[in-house]
Image (spheres, grey):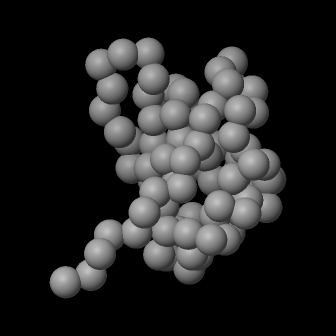
Amino acid sequence: MAALLINQVEESTSDDDIRSFLLKYGFPPLDRVQRVPSEGARPAVLVTFDGATEAELKALLPRIHQVFWKNHTITALVMRAPIAD
């Protein structure tokens, strides 16, 4: 499992829009989209891929990092997988 944090995603952007955007750039199908609350001007989403590794997402990351999408330049970061107990 791996996750991707995408900043500058408007709160009005649907999960389907996010899914379509990522698939367009070659990402595997996502499993979950979680909105990350923001009090500033940087709304974000945390996208989880159960069938992908951190290394796979890191290889795809340059395809979307700093891309202008929906009136914003988005930034993306691969998140570390949680450590199992």
Left or right of 37 on screen, residue 65:
right
Report the front residue among 48 and 78.
Answer: 78
Left or right of 84 on screen, residue 76:
right
In the orientation shown, which residue stands out farthest toward the bottom?
85
In the orientation shown, which residue stands out farthest toward the left?
85
Q: Quadrant of the C terminus?
A: bottom left
Q: Give percent across and percent down for residue 4.
A: 52, 54
Q: Residue at x 79, y 61 (%)?
A: 26
Q: Give percent across and percent down for residue 45.
A: 46, 42
Report the front residue among 13 and 82.
Answer: 82
Report the front residue among 60 and 23.
Answer: 60
Task: Say above or below: 65 vs 74.
Answer: below
Instruction: Give residue 40's quadrant in the image.
Output: top left
Q: Residue at x 75, y 33 (%)?
A: 67
Q: Residue at x 29, y 75 (%)?
A: 83
Report the front residue among 30 and 79.
Answer: 79
How many marks can you see?
Answer: 0
Examine the rendering and report whether any part of residue 32 can be seen: no
Q: Give percent across and percent down for residue 8.
A: 54, 27
Examine the rendering and report whether any part of residue 30 can be seen: yes
Task: Say above or below: 8 vs 16.
Answer: above
Task: Say above or below: 55 vs 17.
Answer: below
Q: Give percent across and percent down for residue 33.
A: 45, 53
